[in-house]
Amino acid sequence: MVETLARLDHDTRQRQIVDAAREIVARGGSGALTVHAIADRVGVSEAGLYKHVDSKDEVLPLLIDDVRESLLREVSRATGPDGTALAKLERLLGLHLSYAESRGGISFICITAALQFGEARVRAAVGQLVEDCLALVEGIVAEGQRRGEVRREISPSGAATALFGMV
């Protein structure tokens, strides 16, 4: 447990909560994610934790949103305006694999945990993550078709689904 004596602002505390949740899920799976475990890792009482999240059910969507934001930030860098569509897709695939390796597979663990979780907010957060990733790949394929780099008969949504499924 980390002793936290200073009062921290809401955003900083939520960041700590998300970081703690990531560590807990990465080490013990979604079953290990409890209010007690999160509070202990952050260094606050359970009552103190409830000042920043309504329940454990609120933590997993925050974690999924964090994964989505950091992944999309990296993807935007890797698939910037330069290069062919195929080069961008190659960089994207490499990024996904290195991202998963560097973060200990936490993205996949969180997504799997979220899909097993019955909470609607969690499922919505995962759905948004998947939709964002699919839309990005569809856009790259469509751009490649417009530029004559990708055959027209290839379905952008089918290519996106296939690439996402590989990852």
Image (cartoon, rainbow, N blue to C red):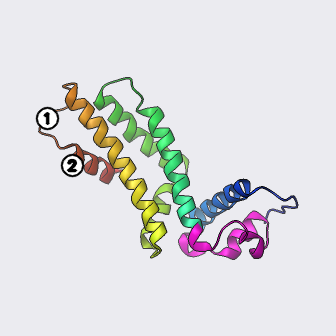
Label 2 crowd bin: few (<14), some (14–19), many (20+), radius 10 Å: few
Disc number for residue 122: none
Residue 108, visible in the rendered structure = yes
The residue at 41%/56% (across/down) is 128
| Magenta segment boundaries in residue numbering | 29-58
Question: Is 137 left, or right, of 124 in this rendering?
Answer: left
* Mark 1 secondary-structure assignment: loop
Q: Nearer the viewer, residue 52 or 26?
A: 52
Q: What residue sits right under mark 2 in the picture? A: 158
Mostly what secondary structure, the magenta segment?
helix
- Amino acid on which disc 2 is placed: Gly
Q: CA distance from mark 2 to mark 1?
A: 12 Å
Q: Nearer the viewer, residue 97 or 146?
A: 146
- Which quadrant of the figure contains the N terminus? bottom right
Percent x, y for residue 42? 74, 63
Percent x, y for residue 88? 35, 32
Residue 75 forms part of the magenta stretch: no
Residue 106, visible in the rendered structure = no
* Mark 2 secondary-structure assignment: helix
66 over 77 or under it: above or below = below
Q: Nearer the viewer, residue 151 or 14?
A: 14
